[in-house]
Structure formats: structure tokens, C-alpha cells
Amino acid sequence: MASSFQADEYVWLSFLRGVPGLLTIGCAVQGWRLAAGVCLVVAVWSDVAVGVVAGRKSLPKTQSVLQVEGFMDFLCFVWAPVQMALAIQLDGWVLAGAGLFVPAGIFRLARFNVEGLLGGGYKGLPVTYNGYIFPAIAVVLNYVSVHRGIALLVVFLGVAILMTSDRFVTPEM
């Protein structure tokens, strides 16, 4: 019974870590780019906090937990960055980039579910890094004079290539 309770606790912790991702999406839809960026960074910290709590409590990682974690990662670090980019610039360039970025993120998450950690790290760029990349790009785009849609397309393409790459391993933190 105790392990079932622990697994349930881990599932609920995983659901709770999705709250900042939902807030990111809501803020982005409202056009509140600064708040969306802050919420996206908080989503990274929430992900880390859940991992630390689960590790310290030795919570079991059941199949349910893995599925919920994958969905929360998609919500927070694939879909929320897309919404944030659309809040920055709604045009065909961003939509095209998002159309490549989303499947790359799905592939990255699926590959991790199948392969797990390899040699003490993650093959390719973990989706969690998007929680820092997109807020940073949003800040940079406020200070440089470039076409925002094309710049976001380039970022989406670059991150998609890095997420799906099997040429490097990102060390586990």
C-alpha cells in the first residue's frame, strides 16, 4: 500500500509541475510576454524541484508516472514555448518553425521514454532547456532589429535539430 501511495504522490507532483506551463500558455495567449517568460523559467525550476523531492523520498517511477511526466514535459517545454513564440510574432514563419519544432519535441520525448539515460546523460538536447532558450530569445528580440518571425523560425529549426540529434549526449544534472 505504501508504494502505491508513493507512486500516486509522484503522479500528483508531476501534475503540479505542469501548472507553470499552463500559466505560460495562458499568459502568452493574453499577450503577456514577460509573464509568460517568467512562468516558463518557473516551469524548469518546478521540474527540477519535483525530481529532487522524488529522489529524496525515493518515490517509484511507475509507467503512469513516466506517461504523466512526458505529457507535462510536452506541455511545459514544447507547447508553451510555441505559444510564447506566437505571442511574440504571429506569422507564417513562426507557424512553419512550430510545425517542425513540435514533432521534434515529440520525437525527443519518445526517444527518452524508450532509451532513457545513455552513458550518464541524455541523447540530444533535453526539451527542458527550452524553458530557458525561449525566454532568452524573447529578451534578445526586444533589443535587436531583425524580423522576429524569421528569427524565431531559425531558433525553432536550431533547437529541433539539437533535440533530435544523436551526435552528442547532454550530461545529467
Image (cartoon, rainbow, N blue to C red):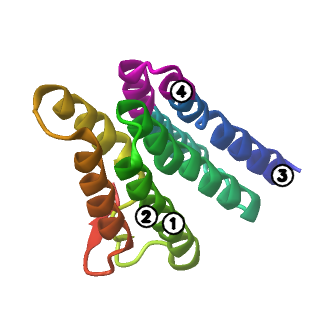
Name the residue carrying label 4.
29
Can you give x and y, in whole percent of width and height, for residue 80 in the image?
A: 50, 40
Label 3 with label 4: CB-CB less than 8 Å: no
Can you give x and y, in whole percent of width and height, for residue 97 in the image?
A: 38, 56
Label 1 with label 2: CB-CB less than 8 Å: yes
Residue 36 belongs to the span the image colors magenta = yes
- Tell me the residue at 53%/46% (across/down): 79
State the separation of the CA atoms marked 3 and 2: 39 Å
Name the residue carrying label 1.
103
Q: Which of marks 3 and 1 is in front?
A: 1
State the separation of the CA atoms marked 1 and 4: 21 Å
Q: What element carries label 2?
A: helix
Name the residue carrying label 3.
4
Does residue 61 appear in this view? no
Quadrant position of the C terminus in the picture? bottom left
Q: Which of marks 3 and 4 is in front?
A: 4
**Chain part drawn in magenta:** 26-42
With respect to residue 37, does 9 lie above or below? below
* Amino acid found under the numbered disc labelled 3: Ser
With respect to residue 91, does 71 lie above or below? below
Dot 2 alpha-carbon crowd within 10 angstroms: few under 14, some 14 to 19, many 20 or more? some
The mark tally for this picture is: 4
State the separation of the CA atoms marked 3 and 4: 38 Å
Along the polypeptide, which appears first: circle 3 or circle 4?
3
Does residue 10 appear in this view? yes
* Amino acid found under the numbered disc labelled 4: Val
State the separation of the CA atoms marked 3 and 1: 33 Å
- Tell me the residue at 89%/50% (across/down): 1
- Tell me the residue at 72%/46% (across/down): 11
